[in-house]
Image (tube, helix red, strand yellow):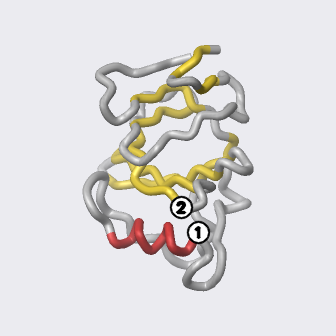
Amino acid sequence: MAAIYGFRLSKQPPFEGVHPAPGWRVRFDGKRTTWLARAATRDGRYLILTASFFGAVHYTILDFVENVRGAMDIVGYGLGIDTTSGPDPAIDKAIDMLHGGRGGGWEVSARNRVAVNITGLRPRDAQAWETP
């Protein structure tokens, strides 16, 4: 277990006290895929991250209360997030939905969630990865 910027990382979920902020880069489950933290809800419960792999943009949502991550619990259509950096109206809409706006409180999908296992962090201005 390593201390990073005053937080502790655990090799096993749930992670303890690590709250990446927008602009941070995150790796999960020991994989090399780098996720960029894009936006957080005002209450700090949810964080949306994006990554590009297999030629497409993917997103995951961290729920810091339940210590899980996954897609939003939406049936029939995706969020339409199609950028890995810069402004994206779909991310703004998703943050609003998660915070309780449009349609009242959404959450991470109960069917497609996994426990959070952060295995690498790189804060906005850091030059190197921090690992447990």
Vertical placement of residue 110 versus 51, above or below: below
Crowd class of label 2 (few under 14; some 14 to 19; many from 20; radius 10 Å): some
Graded by Cα atoms within 10 Å as few (under 14), some (14 to 19) or many (20 or more), the crowding at tag 1 reads: many
Please indicate whether residue 49 sits to the left or right of residue 12 in the image.
left
Which label number is shown at residue 98? 1
Q: Earlier in the sequence, mark 1 or mark 2?
A: 2
- Above or below — where is 85 with respect to 90? above
Task: In this rendered view, identify the residue nearer to me: 119 or 128.
Answer: 128
| Inter-mark Cα distance, 1 to 2 | 7 Å
At 57% from the left and 59% from the top, the residue drawn is 71
Identified at 71% across, 32% down, the residue is 13
Q: Is residue 24 above or below residue 3?
A: below
> Which type of secondary structure does the marked residue at label 1 adopt?
helix
**Which x, y percent locates residue 25?**
40, 37
Q: Nearer the viewer, mark 1 or mark 2?
A: 2
Quadrant of residue 111 within the rendered picture: bottom right
Foreground of the two, 63 or 71: 63
Type of amino acid at the residue the image marks with label 2:
Thr
- Residue furthest to the bottom in view is 103
- Residue 4 falls left or right of residue 89: right
Residue 43 percent coordinates (x, y): 60, 60
Is 58 situated left or right of 113 in this image? left
Q: Is residue 17 left or right of residue 48?
A: right
- Where, quadrant-wise, is the C terminus in this rendering? top right
Determine which residue is flagged by label 2: 41
| Quadrant that contains the N terminus | top right
Residue type, label 1: Leu
Q: Which residue is drawn at the image coordinates 30% and 50% (left, top)?
A: 55
Residue 48 location in percent, x, y? 48, 55
Near-viewer residue (33 or 11): 11
Quadrant in which residue 129 is drawn: top left
Tag shown at residue 44: none
